[in-house]
Amino acid sequence: MRTIHPKLPALPVKVVLMTALLMVMANVTLSAQIRPGMPRVRALLMERQLSEIKKNISIENKDITTFELLYRDYITELFELNSRYEGLFPLESDYDQYSDTQIEENFIKQTEKSKRLLLLREKYFYEFKTIIKPKEIMKLYSIERQILRQAQQEMKERYGNKP
């Protein structure tokens, strides 16, 4: 066996090849889960949420695959809904910088987005209910929000308020 560095142990070629193969397979699996049109960061966040949810709620083993597919569909629809309404300013904004027409349009779009979000959550509540109990669904929503807040905080810490 050859050593590359005198302080590092020599690894058999088989171990190195298996490790490399696993790394490639992990990358392919992750790439396969990124939906078309979904930014990589959003897809990674979805996978992190899904991982935490599966750890913290009770799902029968036979339903895990179905749950994962359903959750990915839910997040994709949620992402598409949020993408449709990008550029809206928060309702708590400084209104002096906007005209009355802009404020009215923003209010109407914010209200429309909120209604669609409620309909989406209601739709998936009943779909999730076929797999998990309502208490677990509420846990799911709570975990989802918690991870989203953590990700937003991390982004603020990394990038500050840079555009």
Image: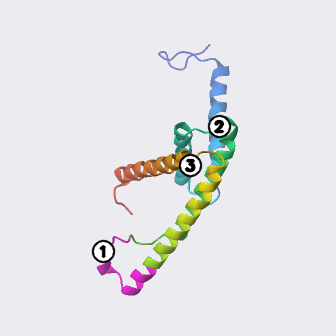
Q: Which region of the structure is painted magenta?
A: 91-106
* Mark earlier in primary sequence (2, 1): 2
Mark 3: which secondary structure?
helix
Distance Cα–Cα, label 3 vs label 2: 15 Å
Residue named by callout 3: 134
- Quarter location, residue 95: bottom left
Above or below, comparing residue 9 to residue 114 in the picture: above
Of the residues shown, which amino acid type is indicated by label 3? Pro
Q: Nearer the viewer, mark 2 or mark 1?
A: 2
Q: Nearer the viewer, mark 3 or mark 2?
A: 3
Mark 1: which secondary structure?
loop
Q: Nearer the viewer, mark 1 or mark 3?
A: 3
- Residue 89, position in %: x, y? 40, 72
- In the picture provided, is 102 more to the left or to the right than 17? left
Mark 2: which secondary structure?
loop
Mark carried by residue 94: 1
Extreme top residue here? 1
- Quarter location, residue 58: top right
Residue named by callout 2: 60
Task: Decide which of 17, 2 is in the foreground and name it.
Answer: 17
Above or below, comparing residue 92 to residue 105 in the picture: above
Give the residue drawn at x 54%, y 40%: 57
Visible residue check, residue 34: no
Task: Give the main secondary structure, helix, strand or loop, of the magenta stretch.
Answer: helix
* Mark earlier in primary sequence (3, 2): 2
- In the picture provided, is 65 more to the left or to the right than 125? right
Of the residues shown, which amino acid type is indicated by label 2? Glu
- Residue 36, position in %: x, y? 65, 58
* Mark earlier in primary sequence (1, 3): 1
Give the residue drawn at x 34%, y 50%: 157
